[in-house]
Image (tube, rainbow, N blue to C red):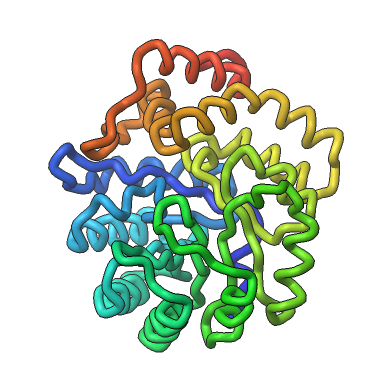
Amino acid sequence: MSSAIFQGLSAFPLTPASPEGRVDADALGRLLERLVAAGVDSIGLLGSTGIYAYLEHSERRRALAAAAEAVAGRTPLIVGIGALRTDWTQELARDAEMRGADALLLAPVSYTPPTEEEVVAHYEAVAEATGLPICVYNNPGTTHVVFSEDLLGRLSRVARIAAVKMPLPRDGDLKGELARLRALAPGDFQIGYSGDWGVAPALLAGADAFYSAIAGILPEPMLALARAAQGGRADEAAALDLAFQPLWALCRAHGGLRVSYAISRLLELEAGEPPRPLRPLSASVTDEVARAIGQLTGGRA
């Protein structure tokens, strides 16, 4: 099993859908074509930005089929398979493998928060149901499951679990956290981060990957920033990151999902509206988003 798929900049697009939750396969294909053309390292389908939690399983299958057809093997496709029940998640894993996914992203979706032993059993059961490599999705803000470093070390030794997608550390000590996790995990275990305002610090600190919502809607400027950081060009990365600061402030204030929808409307990308009960950003905040992305696109909102 190769873990190289979990390296570089992974772009997480929106999943265009009707107000009733019907996936627009054609619009999704157009969003993905932009990412392939830009040259992102992988595409994260049906992540949090891809509204997986708001879609019926049949619509998640529709999105996967459309994505596999649109991407056609040109860019690795990492597919989110999180679900409340283990058997549902196993079904989604098998379906994703059958329909052309290259790897899986697994969040431990919860209502009653599971114990660490239950989390391990869940991941082991899903790993046994597929031959694809799996990335642990550590997203306590949405799942309310907190992964200790020891738990991540245990999971890193489960067959087919090849990577983790981490939130940014609260204390900002990326190098320290990376060192601790690498001491607990096998040498080929890939450690990546999300939280778009941390792309430059994380990659400069030596993270293997960055998982980005904004790259799913603005791939070119995010790639420029990521490549500078990956190359260790700290001054260049800092200069590029400075232009992103108004956008990062909006993402922190309103959430990357809402901001991504606002950008899609401004760029006329036909991604639809946020799923109810979520609401689009107000006109005044959308104007702020337009000004922020104008700094990144030569004044074109």
User: Against 106, is 158 above or below?
Assistant: below
Nearer-the-camera pick, 74 or 49: 49
User: Against 286, is 61 above or below?
Assistant: below
Choose top left, top right, bottom left or bottom right for residue 274. Answer: top left
User: Against 33, is 135 above or below?
Assistant: below
Give the image location of residue 139, x and y in percent.
Answer: 48, 56
Q: Residue at x 41, y 38 (%)?
A: 257
Task: Tell me the quarter of the image containing the N terminus.
Answer: bottom right
Q: Residue at x 82, y 34 (%)?
A: 236
Choose top left, top right, bottom left or bottom right for residue 86. Answer: bottom left
Horizontal placement of 275 versus 134: left or right?
Answer: left
Can residue 141 be seen here? The reply is yes
Nearer-the-camera pick, 6 or 128: 128
User: Against 48, is 242 above or below?
Assistant: above
Horizontal placement of 194 versus 174: left or right?
Answer: left
Give the image location of residue 53, x and y in percent.
Answer: 29, 54
Horizontal placement of 25 versus 293: left or right?
Answer: left
Which residue is outermost to the left? Answer: 20
Horizontal placement of 250 versus 25: left or right?
Answer: right
Choose top left, top right, bottom left or bottom right for residue 93. Answer: bottom left
Can residue 82 be seen here? The reply is no
Give the image location of residue 265, x and y in percent.
Answer: 36, 24
